[in-house]
Amino acid sequence: MSTLFISDLHLEPSREDITAQFLEFMAGPAREAETLYLLGDVFEAWVGDDFRNSYSDRIEAAIREVSDAGVACRFMHGNRDFLVGDAFAERTGCTLLDEETVVDLYGEQVLLMHGDSLCTDDIAYQQFRKMVRDPNWQRQFLGLPAEQRVALARQARERSRTDSATKTDDIMDVNPRTVEATMRAHGVHTLLHGHTHRPAVHEFELDGTPARRIVLGDWYTQGSMVRWNADGFELQTLDRST
Ligand code: LP5
Ligand code: MN
């Protein structure tokens, strides 16, 4: 039995290739797992659990079927789907995870994160994050009519696109000191996250002990997954059949 991790699918109706690959994944490999971790940005944008359509219903049903097949499904928020809430969790059978969660993987303590909070050189993003993660802001936003929420999300996406074009790659990557401080705070030597769309396994030393940071990739042109079992982990790319 394995534990599977995926993130950064950015599912949306216009991305039929990603959607098809995700649905195939959920109908196949996901069913063989003991636990499936969805580590954020599963959706391109999520404006509230009450905003549903045939597309989101299809995705939710696919997750529900995996839960019903006996796989423990865990969902962590990303910077695009931080408004996923209890109703989504109820409908899909997922458990929502805290933004910094330590799990025991076959005897190893591993810190799971989406990864956006580690990009501390990106001051503009961290300010935006602080605002939208505030429960009062979220209550107000979720109280707006759905069309208004969709329009605001579109504006935020546009602004993000123009802003990101002016940021260097370094600014949009994780800050090594933040990584170390976060790992130290949780007493772990392994961190697994997504968000940066730079799949890799980084080996380094943390306080004189070997440490590693495993980064999941996005699903834009192919899938990306970490498979973990009693023998260890593997960061894999998943070819697209379509
Ligand atoms: O996701 P990616 O990789 O493109 O960019 C992120 C950071 N951007 C974001 C913003 C999201 O894309 C916005 C969409 C969220 C939809 C969900 C719900 C609705 C919320 C509505 C909010 C009003 O996360 C980007 C990082 C990059 O990762 C790399 O780490 O750099 O950060 C930014 O670009 C932030 C900007 O620099 C500053 C904030 C711009 C948003 C301003 C809001 C304007 C809303 C309109 C109000 C009238
Ligand atoms: Mn992200």
Image (cartoon, helix red, strand yellow):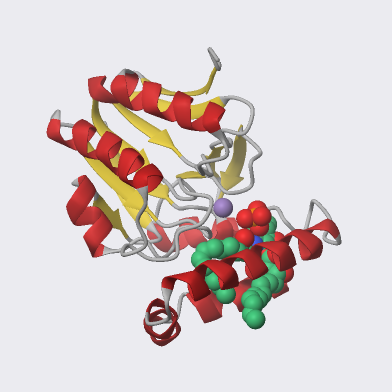
- Closer to us: 186 or 236: 236
Q: Is residue 122 at least partly visible in the picture?
A: no
Q: Please provide percent x and percent y for residue 3.
A: 30, 29
What residue is drawn where x is 18% and y is 46%?
Answer: 93
Please say if 157 is above or below 34.
Answer: below
The N terminus lies in which quarter of the figure? Answer: top left
Quadrant field for ligand 1: bottom right
Q: In this view, does 230 lie to the left or right of 158?
A: left
Q: Is residue 63 at least partly visible in the picture?
A: yes
Q: Please provide percent x and percent y for residue 5.
A: 40, 35
The C terminus lies in which quarter of the figure? Answer: top right
Please say if 240 is above or below 196.
Answer: above
Please say if 114 is above or below 178.
Answer: above
Q: In this view, does 161 lie to the left or right of 148?
A: right
Q: Please provide percent x and percent y for residue 179.
A: 57, 56
What residue is drawn where x is 29% and y is 34%?
Answer: 62
- Closer to us: 6 or 93: 93
Please say if 165 is above or below 32.
Answer: below
- Closer to us: 109 or 71: 71
What residue is drawn where x is 44% and y is 63%?
Answer: 82
Q: In this view, does 186 lie to the left or right of 177?
A: left
The quadrant holding residue 48 is bottom left
Q: Please provide percent x and percent y for residue 145.
A: 42, 77
What residue is drawn where x is 40% and y is 87%?
Answer: 136
